[in-house]
Amino acid sequence: MDDSYYVVYKGAIHILRHISRLHVMFTPFGGLILPHLFPDSDTHIAPSMDTAKAQTIFRTNEQVTAPEPSELCECSLHLALVFSQIAIQKTEPSDDSDRSRRLDRQIELLSERAKLPGFETDLNLIVAICKETLAHPLEETHSLQRIQRYVKSLLSRFNFFHDTADLEEIIPLLQQYADDPTGELRNCRETLCDARCKLFSLCGGADNLTFAIAAIQHLLLAPIRDKEWRNLDHVRLQKGRSLLALIFEKQPAAEMDQQHGIALLEVYREMLRLPYRMMEVGMDLHLSLPRLSRVQELASEAFEYALLFSSPEEAVEMLEKSRDVFWTQTLRLRSSFDDLPPHLAERLKIVTPKLESYIHMMYSTNWEHDLDRYKQELNVLRSTQKEFQSLAEEVRQLEGYERFMTDPDPHFSSLAMAAQKGPVVILVARETCTDAIIIRSPTSGAEHLVLGGISIKRLSDIFIQMKDYNTRSRESPVDTSYDSADDRPSVRAGGDRSLNILWQEVVRPVINALGYQEAQLDESVHLAAALMFCGFRSVVATMWSMDDLDGPEVAEAIYTELFRGYPFNPDDIPYALDAAVKGMRARGLPPSRWATYVHMGV
């Protein structure tokens, strides 16, 4: 008897240590066979071997008495499969129940072994066994479970071997359940979306793309699916975005034709509903805020594709719907309910203040040392939330209030009213450029302007530079030795350069598009002369631009001198200006700073 015998025997003993978990997998005769085959299983000693030799070959005494690991080792897994196969072979062909149960156990074991390197072909056995189980007549519920397991086995095999035949077998199997309203079939619809998108990702094709986009829209995101995804809309949205990412890997949106682009926009319209469901009115702040942080790029994606496949007006609508979800939903608790029927309005006026105060109280209070009170207050909050949701649902049954407390539906005509008093410009930065939307008036529509030199990365760099400049500017002392604030090195090196970029590449193109031109100064009449013409007897003016630092100082000196005595004497003004200029010269300021000031009048 060589050592390999003991290794195999050790594996069998290891299985027996897990008998409570595995005996049903490999005992064809009701559990009586194992004690007879391995009577000394408790001692871990193989037949015809002394204890000392067994412990030397296998483990030390401490290892013998140590608890066994919960997972099956590789050797145990192989032996368990052997026993499982024996059990299946010994099962009477007429005993469908036992055979089905043992096939289930065989699938579990093969699924574990398929994860090991070199045993990937076990996936073929799993598919074959799952397909065999479909032939056994069962109740409808169990039949669906077997179909789902067969589909899962095909999908697992596809993920490893990438054989599209598996996907082509999955799709018709699940398509029969696609339109069934039963909520329990959500997993079937989700898997069908996976299969459609993976088929397009591997094979491409216009038809496959059409089916993939339609599956995401109708089987995953459509309003009819809202109930089965209740409280899981964050998972639903993430799933939709991951499937779109899979599609875009094969064919970027910019390369899609108009038909598929419009279908893609419909998907994004459905997606834009979901943040409002994730941040449902009256929901706990600590639950909704983290979920919203995961969908920050959704707004820019929807905006970009609306510009690509539709119009600037629709892009504005989608951008407005996707921004500021948190405050929109939070402030709805302070809405006016005066338009509702009186019996509903009164109840909502009582419930909403209570709900808002409880939400903020639960979010802002530290409950670490008062868990009992926390549970009590939480129960009150939950009952108040249920009452509010019930009232909101009751209102939505009324004609004209179908969208009460749901996601808003902004129309461009109402959004454009913001341009009543002047043009509105919307800037949206993307990876390659910045889009500017110009709304000149409430009736002018929207114009799209591409600012190609400004990407989101470049804007981020400018932001960092400006932030650094502002910090250094605040921390450094004011240096009055320069002709103007713009001459200071920190300004020249930091803010001036960054602001010039923004002016040249963002502001100026927009101003040019609006047709604005810089007003030409009327130099024919000096401002001081114009004031004297209007009746002022004495005017202090400048011959060129003064420094911002000097203006307050000169004004303070003049008015201090002017109001020194009573009555007021205008003749004191030139003397006050002279004193202020002398003070600037005494500090050593350059002539360009003090020579600009002049007095005109009597």
Image (cartoon, rainbow, N blue to C red):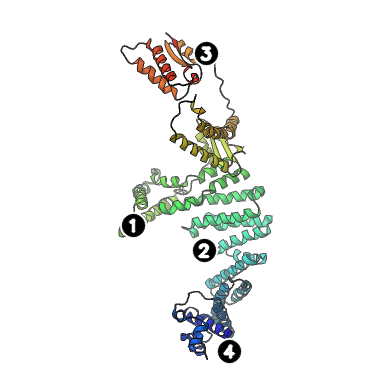
Q: Name the N-terminal-most of marks 3 and 4.
A: 4
Q: Which mark is residue 182?
A: 2
Q: Helix or strand or loop: what does disc 4 sit on?
A: loop
Mark 1–mark 4 Cα distance, whole angstroms, equals 64 Å
Kind of residue at badge 4: Met
Mark 2–mark 4 Cα distance, whole angstroms, equals 61 Å
Q: Which mark is residue 525?
A: 3
Mark 2–mark 3 Cα distance, whole angstroms, equals 83 Å
Kind of residue at badge 1: Glu
Q: Which mark is residue 1?
A: 4
Kind of residue at badge 3: Val
Q: Helix or strand or loop: what does disc 1 sit on?
A: loop
Q: Is residue 341 left or right of residue 223?
A: left
Q: Helix or strand or loop: what does disc 3 sit on?
A: loop
Mark 2–mark 1 Cα distance, whole angstroms, equals 42 Å
Residue 86 visible somewhere in the drawing: yes
Q: Name the N-terminal-most of marks 3 and 1.
A: 1
Expressed as whole percent of the image width and height from the top left, the position of residue 369 reads 31, 58
